[in-house]
Image (cartoon, grey):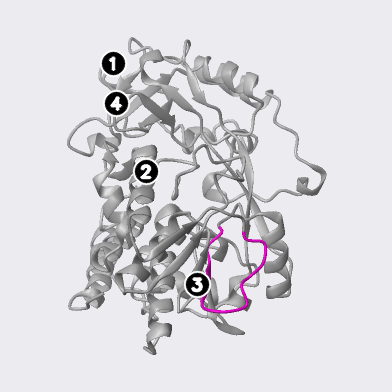
Amino acid sequence: MKVTIIGGGLAGSEAALQLAKKGVRSDLCEMRPDRTTGAHKTGYLAELVCSNSLGSNDPHSASGLLKQELRMLGSFLIKFADECSVSAGNALAVDRDLFAQKVTDEIKKNNLINLVNAEITEIPAHNPVIISSGPLTSDSLAKKIIEFTGRENLYFFDAIAPVIERDSINFEKAFTANRYNKGDSPAYINCPMSREEYEIFYETLVNSPVIELKEFEKNAKFFESCLPVEVLAKRGKDTLRYGPLKPVGLTDPRTNRENYAVVQLRQDNKAATLYNMVGFQTNLKWPAQKQLIQCIPGLENATITRFGVMHRNTFIHSPSVLMPTLQAKNRRELFFAGQITGVEGYTESIATGLLAGINAAGLLSGQQTLIFPQTTMLGALCSYITHEEHGNFQPINSNWGLLEPPVRQKNKKLRHELLSERALEVYRGLSF
């Protein structure tokens, strides 16, 4: 018997490789490149769309802990990300194309994985199935998922940040540095602004035209950690200065002082020829994006290789649909994984794909499916998305507040270290 996996993103690719590791065959179904999504650029599996960063790599951060847990569980995609990493201070960022190509090559050469490039419009009725079609699930499959779950899918809007050619950046104004000088070498390009320059930038931003939403999108909901800059800006003139454009910890080496605001750019490919604008997700019309970007000091002649866009992300109401094993409550051989479950973030998608793959293999072999304790980040994430406590289920990233029980320690740094060590202890001695 084999497993059908719908969706070749991060979760689906990780699930397929985990199944193959257990000797289980799978059909990995991905509609691209025959049918595109409007947000993807390539036909590769596991393409990173919004950013090239998987978040912090510090094991004493929530995101870093989840990565370390995945390494101990034998995650293939975290291993590939480590191999394709680019300089990004304490973050794990990758060359997007190199990473996606590596995942695609590994899957294509695996004899236990059959890659099917076709759109799946129905939920297969037989054999174990993992639905990892992601936030950009096609309309036809989304309708079938709605029928299965018995309720309308929820959604939020996500936006992509522009990408700039490094050679077009003016380093007479821009400088390289990491915030608080963390990391071995400077990984970020920083474009500083004086108060006057920021006010010009701000006025340009709030008066720039955005791409019109379709009628059914008018009541758009945004994910708080990925808000478009134009939405953030309208919350107040200084909102950006305390958010993605914050100058704190970035001392300009030429003046030895902090600037009024700073736009950061992070390496996007291995060759260091492309840089993406950190926290600069936007849905402005493209000519307006160009005008806005070129009013930033250091980016007056910026060559934009990819403009920002916004797209609708779909997710199910997991608390009413899923168990912590990621199995559907009313069909145990059906699993969901990735952002469609309500986890937000690349690492979180990989994590749920890994668990779904391990549990689907366990189901086929008659073994007990796994539920990790809430003292681990993976267990806490799965517990959150499958237990509704506040009546308003929303997507979530890994964060310290998910772990149970809490550690009573006033010193935050020490508390995070204790939480991290407690979580990793669960995995020591386990074999996957």
Q: Which residue is mark 1?
A: 255
Whether residue 349 appears in this view of the structure is no
Q: Amino acid at mark 4?
A: Thr
Whether residue 333 appears in this view of the structure is yes
Q: Residues within 10 Å of mark 1 (few under 14, many from 20)?
A: few
* Magenta highlight on residue 121: yes
Q: Nearer the viewer, mark 2 or mark 3?
A: 2
Query: Dot 3 lies on which element?
Result: helix
Q: Main secondary structure of the magenta part?
A: loop
Q: Are marks 3 and 1 in contact (CB under 8 Å)?
A: no
Q: Which residue is mark 4?
A: 251
Location of the C terminus by quadrant is bottom left
Residues at marks 2 and 1, CA–CA distance in whole angstroms: 42 Å
Q: Nearer the viewer, mark 3 or mark 1?
A: 3
- Tell me which numbered mark, 2 or 3, is placed earlier along the sequence: 2
Query: Dot 1 lies on which element?
Result: loop
Q: Residues in magenta?
A: 120-133
- Tell me which numbered mark, 2 or 1, is placed earlier along the sequence: 2
Is 78 or 177 nearer to us in this picture?
Answer: 78
- Tell me which numbered mark, 4 or 2, is placed earlier along the sequence: 2
Q: Which residue is mark 3?
A: 384
Q: Amino acid at mark 3?
A: Tyr
**Image quadrant assignment for residue 160:** top right
Q: Residue 101: which disc?
A: 2
Name the spot of residue 78 as percent of width and height, x first: 31, 55
* Magenta highlight on residue 22: no
Q: Are marks 1 and 4 in contact (CB under 8 Å)?
A: no
Query: Dot 2 lies on which element?
Result: helix
